Amino acid sequence: MLDESRWRPVFETVHDRLLTPVGLRSLAPGHPDYTPKSFGDRRSRDAASHQGTVWGWLIGPFLDAWLKVLPDDRAGARACLDVLIAHLDDFRVGSIAEVFDAEPPFHPRGRIAQAWSVAEVLRCLIRTTDAD
């Protein structure tokens, strides 16, 4: 879909502007509509959900791109999962929060269990673990 000459610049932009320890921001800081926290009433939370809120499940497509652009750096890609893997025990249910704030300390928000985030972390763990 994207010309190979653009893979690295797109990857680097996403890495530098959207990647957090708990997934990808839905909008980069510096954009006029950027919202660093997802809280308040339902309307406020819904409005923030695509204005910076971090979605854990987006780590999956990002790591797919990582392995396409940097196929010899599975360890670097794997390191992106560390905080999400540790988060699995935060609520004592073995799950990952629905969303996170877009800035440190990346407070979990929404529901405490999001299956697609867990699935993406497990899928990426398999993809980035050495077969040896």
Image: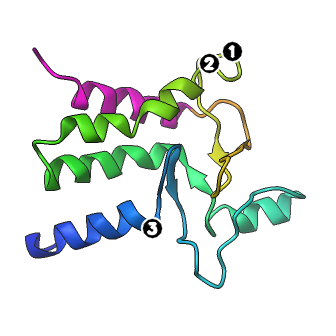
Q: Vertical placement of 126 versus 60: above or below?
A: above
Q: Is mark 3 on a helix, strand or loop?
A: helix
**Contact, mark 1 vs mark 2 (Cβ under 8 Å):** yes
Rendered image: mark on residue 17: 3
Q: In this view, does 73 lie to the left or right of 20?
A: left
Please name the residue shown 85% across and 57% down the image: 42
Please name the residue shown 27% across and 64% down the image: 11
Residue 121: in magenta span: yes
Foreground pick, 46 / 63 = 63
Mark 2 crowdedness (10 Å alpha carbons): few <14, some 14-19, many ≥20: few
| Mark closest to the chain's N terminus, 1 or 3 | 3
Q: Is residue 1 at all visible to an observer of this figure?
A: no
Q: Which amino acid, mark 2?
A: Asp
Give the overall secondary structure of the magenta segment: helix
Please name the residue shown 27% across and 70% down the image: 10
Q: How is the image coloured?
A: rainbow
Residue 39 in the image: x percent, y percent?
82, 56
User: Which label lies toward us, 1 or 3?
Assistant: 3
Residue 52 in the image: x percent, y percent?
61, 65
Q: Is residue 29 left or right of residue 81?
A: right
The quadrant of the image that shows the C terminus is top left
Q: Name the residue under label 2.
A: 89
Residue 125 in the image: x percent, y percent?
32, 27
Q: Give the range drawn in magenta.
A: 115-132
Rendered image: mark on residue 92: 1
Q: Is mark 2 on a helix, strand or loop?
A: loop
Q: Which amino acid, mark 3?
A: Arg
Residue 40 in the image: x percent, y percent?
88, 58
Q: Which amino acid, mark 1?
A: Arg
Mark 3 crowdedness (10 Å alpha carbons): few <14, some 14-19, many ≥20: some
Please name the residue shown 35% across and 36% down the image: 79
